[in-house]
Image (tube, grey):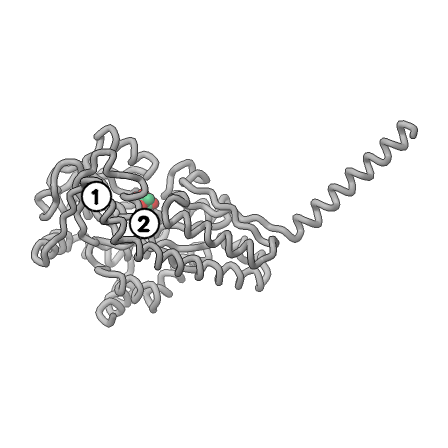
């Protein structure tokens, strides 16, 4: 074989490879999915479940690749929504708290002592209020598909048991980067400090902060007790739903079939994760107690003292969230 002939073959071979990969990429599509927590937590597992279901049912035509630990936004979880809206991220399974700086309606879920139990969460997310929340997200450039759940958030600290607002007095509490939390913990007399989850763990370890608030699953999996958080109060002061969502341009570029597939699999993964998170709560609590954490439960009277102390937060934030939405949620809760 002459040199020119082998060169010609080589070039033809290259062209063949290029053709093949072009036709593959015309059919196979990979979407990035951002999460704050990894698959060691129910939250990350929700995203992995979504990816698994999509892989199975699309026959490899559509792939979701999950990027945990807020890595697509360099650890800054409150930038996740903007990054998804701008197309830097294709999709996310995100927390209402982290998206609330861009979607004020999402502060609904962070109103202190507003949504008291699981039935109330379901009544809100599954009813008219939930639809209004999804419309608010859509109007800001992101297509919401389904609900998941990070869980009811409980407060912990390294100093002592908390059973009344006074016990929080002067405690440095790490809060998520959403202004409502600043107001809640200030109203309770604490000293709230905003930081990302990535920064919170080292700050707990060094004792730069005294406390934090997160669902039991996060406390348990991240072994928050091992960084000095020996006192945990169960006060269910807010629930943190998760939302499965996709960038709107990406959404529009998908076929109707692919859209249906993405929505149905998100709904399935969300329902699966919500059930699992709730089922595991009591085991998680037992495990936390076994590791030596003091767990405080509130009497009705003690609970009411926290409700009263945070009334101003409700008054300040209800208009920002939208009175109509707050009322729709309140009626759903009352009727549950
Ligand atoms: O940062 C937190 O506390 C976390 C992990 O729960 C959220 O992303 C809201």
Dot 1: few (<14), some (14–19), or many (≥20) neighbours within 10 Å?
few
Q: Quadrant of residue 80?
A: top left
* Image spot of residue 332 (x, y percent): 27, 69
Residue under label 2, please give it: 97
Rendered position, 284 above or below 207: below
Can residue 101 be seen from the camera position used here? yes
Mark 1 and mark 2: span between their CA atoms? 30 Å
Dot 2: few (<14), some (14–19), or many (≥20) neighbours within 10 Å?
many
- Viewer-nearest residue: 56 or 112: 56
Rendered position, 205 above or below 34: above
Disc nearer the start of the sequence (1/2): 2
Residue under label 1, please give it: 290
Q: Is mark 2 within 8 Å of ligand 1?
A: yes
Question: Left of 185 or right of it: where is 61?
Answer: right
Regarding mark 2 in the picture, which secondary structure is present there?
A: helix
**Count of numbered labels shown in the rendering:** 2
Q: Quadrant of ligand 1?
A: top left
At horizontal 18% and vertical 41% (from top left) the residue drawn is 293
At horizontal 23% and vertical 48% (from top left) the residue drawn is 286
* Image spot of residue 114 (x, y percent): 21, 59
Question: Left of 186 or right of it: where is 324?
Answer: right
At horizontal 58% and vertical 56% (from top left) the residue drawn is 253
* Image spot of residue 27 (x, y percent): 65, 53
């Amino acid at each position: 074989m002459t040199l020119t002939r082998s060169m010609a073959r080589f070039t033809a071979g290259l062209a063949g490879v290029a053709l093949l990969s072009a036709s593959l990429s015309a059919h196979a599509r990979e979407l990035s999915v951002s999460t704050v927590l990894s698959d060691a937590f129910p939250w990350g597992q929700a995203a992995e479940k979504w990816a698994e279901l999509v892989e199975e049912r699309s026959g490899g035509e559509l792939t979701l690749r999950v990027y945990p630990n807020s890595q697509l936004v360099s650890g800054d979880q409150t930038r996740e929504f903007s990054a998804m809206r701008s197309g830097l991220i294709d999709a996310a399974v995100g927390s209402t708290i982290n998206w609330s700086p861009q979607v004020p309606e999402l502060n609904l879920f962070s109103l202190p002592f507003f949504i008291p139990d699981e039935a109330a969460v379901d009544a809100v997310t599954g009813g008219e209020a939930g639809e209004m929340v999804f419309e608010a997200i859509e109007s800001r450039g992101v297509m919401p598909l389904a609900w998941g759940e990070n869980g009811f958030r409980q407060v912990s600290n390294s100093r002592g048991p908390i059973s009344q607002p006074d016990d929080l007095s002067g405690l440095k509490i790490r809060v998520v980067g959403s202004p409502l939390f600043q107001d809640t913990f200030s109203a309770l007399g604490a000293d709230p400090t905003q930081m990302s989850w990535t920064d919170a763990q080292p700050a707990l370890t060094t004792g730069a902060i005294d406390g934090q608030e997160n669902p039991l699953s996060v406390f348990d999996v991240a072994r928050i007790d091992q960084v000095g958080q020996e006192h945990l109060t169960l006060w269910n002061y807010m629930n943190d739903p998760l939302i499965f969502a996709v960038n709107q341009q990406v959404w529009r570029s998908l076929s109707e079939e692919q859209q249906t597939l993405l929505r149905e699999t998100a709904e399935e993964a969300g329902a699966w994760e919500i059930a699992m998170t709730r089922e595991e709560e009591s085991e998680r609590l037992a495990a936390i107690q076994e590791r030596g954490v003091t767990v405080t439960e509130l009497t009705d009277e003690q609970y009411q003292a926290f409700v009263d102390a945070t009334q101003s937060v409700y008054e300040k934030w209800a208009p920002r969230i939208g009175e109509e939405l707050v009322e729709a949620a309140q009626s759903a809760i009352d009727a549950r």
